[in-house]
Amino acid sequence: MKRLILSLTLLSLIPATAFSQRSRDYGTNVLAEYYFGLLPSARAMAMGNADVSVGGAVGSIFYNPAAIGSLQGLHTEFSEATPFYALSNCRYHYLGGSYRLNEYLNAAVTFRQEAVGETTFDINVNGNYYPLDKPRDTDFGLTLAATPVKNLHIGAGVHQLRRRDRADLKGNVMNFDVGLLYALELPSNEKMEQKLQFGASVTNFTRGIMDFSIAGDTAYSPTPSFFRAGISYHADFKNTGWSFLTQAEYQNVFTYEYATAYRWGAEVGWKNLIFGRVGAFTLSQDALGLPEINRSRETDFTYGFGTRIPLHDLSKGKIPFDLNADLTVLELQGGSFSTPRLDNFSNFAFRMTWFLEE
């Protein structure tokens, strides 16, 4: 436990010592939603968008790169979220896969893209405005997670983020993430197994700067560096088939004075086949100097459902994988008090656990 506390402390100090000055102009950056909003895990979104201390899925690496450390064999995932607030043509896609290389090492590759579609927006490059043409953000990621000792996972990931606002206006930035996940086994018996998990991660600890140019103009856009830490409790009641998970998470952005968040989530499962999820979060945000019009804090509830279909067992081994399906449908809250909730957001995901022949 002393090692865990020391590791969490050192991890939280990485950005604080390297980047002590916090940005005040990030609130209008279009990449803010990419980092703090849509993420590929429908399961996590249903639980307040928290996942740093839970893991167990490929998409969890966007919350904590150590999260794949407990996965065995081959796992693949796909998710899609649509639409994005009032942008009815916007689509969010995600593909990911992980594979255990040996007893101590797991690797994952991921792809995600937010394609806005047709818009009437302009982009400001050094005081010059250019119309956008089907802008999109694309992220290619590679993550490695090691298990040096039992129940302790350490992960690191690199992400190449490419932004295209129009054919002649493109930007690139590389982000590096680190994280750890530790499971503490609690007293258990033949009726119940239980454990606590502690997780922490730093996203973009090198504080990458995106640069893009058009018509001789060059602009630079900072990308956020932030810290997540959380704790989760897991209980499996083996005699009844029920399972329970609850978690709490804290988020602090080192390069931005807003987007500090507190998140909570819970999941109840039955026989590892059906799952119900709820969550809540509160997130500080920039009111742009108009607190009487714009929200300075977003607070909301979340919910979703999931199911596992044991195709491998049902087909007596003929189908080489089991399938998990997750769904989250939310009414998104607007940034201003006068903006009505939009009930057109959904995120669905499929997760496959493969049974490979030895």
Image (cartoon, rainbow, N blue to C red):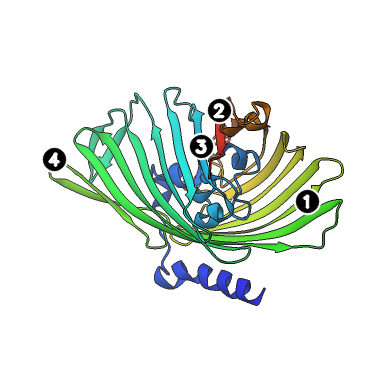
Q: Residues within 10 Å of mark 3 (few under 14, many from 20)?
A: many
The type of residue carrying mark 4 is Ala
Q: Residues within 10 Å of mark 4 (few under 14, many from 20)?
A: few
Residue at (37% x, 60% y) in the render? 207
Tell me, yes or no, if residue 283 can be seen here: yes
Per the model, the C-alpha gap separating discs 3 and 4 is 40 Å
Per the model, the C-alpha gap separating discs 4 and 1 is 59 Å
Tell me whether the residue at label 4 lies in contact with that at label 1, contact meaning CB atoms closer than 8 angstroms. Answer: no
- Front: mark 3 or 4: 3
- Front: mark 1 or 2: 1
Residue 118 % position (x, y): 34, 23
Tell me, yes or no, if residue 339 can be seen here: no
Per the model, the C-alpha gap separating discs 3 and 1 is 25 Å
Per the model, the C-alpha gap separating discs 3 and 2 is 20 Å
Q: Which residue is mark 4?
A: 215
Earlier-in-chain disc, 1 versus 2: 1
